[in-house]
Amino acid sequence: MKPVVKIGLIGAGFIGRAHGLAINAVNATFADLPARAVAHVLCDADGAKAATQAEAMGFATSTSDWKKAVEMADAVIIAVPSRDHAAIARYAFSLKKPVLCEKPVGLSAAEASALAKEAKAAGVVTAAGFTYLRAPMVAEARNIIASGKLGKPVHFYGRHFEDYLASPDAPFSWRLDRTFAGRCGALGDLGCHIISIARALCGPIASLSGNIALVHAERRTGGAGSPLRKVENEDVASAVVRFASGITGVIETSRIAHGRKMDLAFEVTCERGSISLHAERLNELDVYAAGDDGFRKVLINPSHPDYAAFLPAPGHGLGFNDLKTIELAGFLRGIAAGQSSYPDLGEAARISSLCEAIVSSSETRRWIDDPEAFHYV
Ligand SMILES: NC(=O)c1ccc[n+]([C@@H]2O[C@H](COP(=O)([O-])OP(=O)(O)OC[C@H]3O[C@@H](n4cnc5c(N)ncnc54)[C@H](O)[C@@H]3O)[C@@H](O)[C@H]2O)c1
């Protein structure tokens, strides 16, 4: 019999639901897992929402008290706004319970980095929710680059654009409030994903120059006529970066890009070709080898990382929620092995440092060296 891991899921919002679906799917999808996930307790500050979602997703019980949920669980998934990540994670560490925490981890790079150190000291396995690193075609891009078939990378371009705040009439939410989301806006919510991919494909970033803007400085707290509230973090950000390998790159993010729904995209130019992905077409990779007439579209198939666990036929495709199933499988393998799975809280801290360095560089109009170790004080 496989050991059972009773999961405590904290947060039943957008991403909490994706985790709940993943807990239900992971054992059947990855039949070879060394441990079996059980939907044990679902917690949400809104107790009625917790109860309804718990019933819908087959959790044994629900609560509105995250401490109780942590105590009842063998492992904890933190899927609430950043403000409460640290308190929940620290309580789980004190009880030696593994933690999968959503991105961006904690309210700041300093907090994420403290949590990474505390988890290590407590000997607790961690993982962080950089969902798109789990996409088979992102993993395949990484494999192709690592294989050297296209030569070494010489340039990175990446963006993550969405339009959920493109309308000036979109109301204020916790994502715009530093108390709940931290200093980074579009960067903390979206930019961190493309930064996670930049690091995965091209390695550490050695220096950067950032440029940010807050376009809609005030938003209504509700419908028309409701009070206005100041927005506390940026709508758009861009950075020119230099990787430790010496190559250059450009990274951009926006939460106000009209028409862009899930526009995470990258292109890595290598010595003998290029590789490009657009997440609105998550199951395709465009590959160009020098001498070809143009980019060749590679459709997902069972030879690509993790896809065969879902489907035996090529081109049928995975979706966002499937990526959370892949993420959870990695977390469970990590728990069974007693080793944090990539990306862990240490990686999350480096990504948050890069986000904060972009903001600080823009504010001070200067390049920042060693931005992966940058923390606001
Ligand atoms: N990896 C991804 O692709 C991805 C996508 C969306 C959100 N996220 C991250 O997930 C986290 C949550 O975002 P969301 O979009 O699901 O937010 P959301 O607003 O949709 O849901 C948050 C839920 O948490 C509950 N909550 C808040 N504080 C709580 C507390 N102290 N105890 C228990 N419940 C609490 C709220 O009642 C709400 O139901 C954030 O860190 C966000 O950045 C990640």
Image (cartoon, helix red, strand yellow):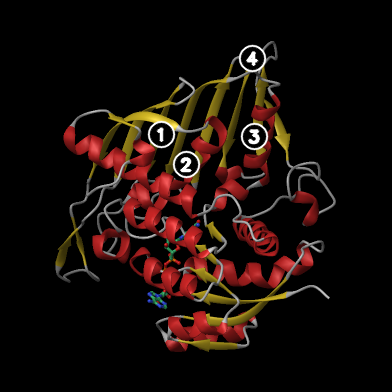
| Element at label 1 | strand
CA distance separating discs 3 and 2: 14 Å
| Residue 57 place in picture, x, y as percent | 62, 79
Kind of residue sitting beneath label 4: Arg
Kindly check if marks 1 and 3 are in contact, taking CB atoms under 8 A apart as contact.
Answer: no
The response on whether ligand 1 sits within 8 Å of label 2 is no
Dot 4 or dot 1: first in sequence order is 1
Kindly check if marks 1 and 2 are in contact, taking CB atoms under 8 A apart as contact.
Answer: yes
CA distance separating discs 3 and 4: 15 Å
The response on whether ligand 1 sits within 8 Å of label 3 is no
**Camera-nearest residue between 262 and 10:** 10
CA distance separating discs 1 and 3: 18 Å
CA distance separating discs 1 and 2: 7 Å
| Element at label 2 | helix
Dot 1 or dot 2: first in sequence order is 2
Dot 1 or dot 3: first in sequence order is 3
Kind of residue sitting beneath label 1: Ile
CA distance separating discs 4 and 2: 23 Å
- Please rate how many residues cluster around mark 4, counting C-alpha atoms within 10 Å: few if below 14, some from 14 to 19, many from 20: some
CA distance separating discs 4 and 1: 22 Å
Marker disc for residue 141? 3
Residue at image coords 84%, 49%: 313
- Please rate how many residues cluster around mark 3, counting C-alpha atoms within 10 Å: few if below 14, some from 14 to 19, many from 20: many
| Residue on which disc 4 sits | 272
Quadrant position of ligand 1: bottom left
- Please rate how many residues cluster around mark 1, counting C-alpha atoms within 10 Å: few if below 14, some from 14 to 19, many from 20: many
Residue 259 makes an appearance in the image: no
| Residue 317 place in picture, x, y as percent | 71, 50
Dot 3 or dot 2: first in sequence order is 3
| Element at label 3 | helix
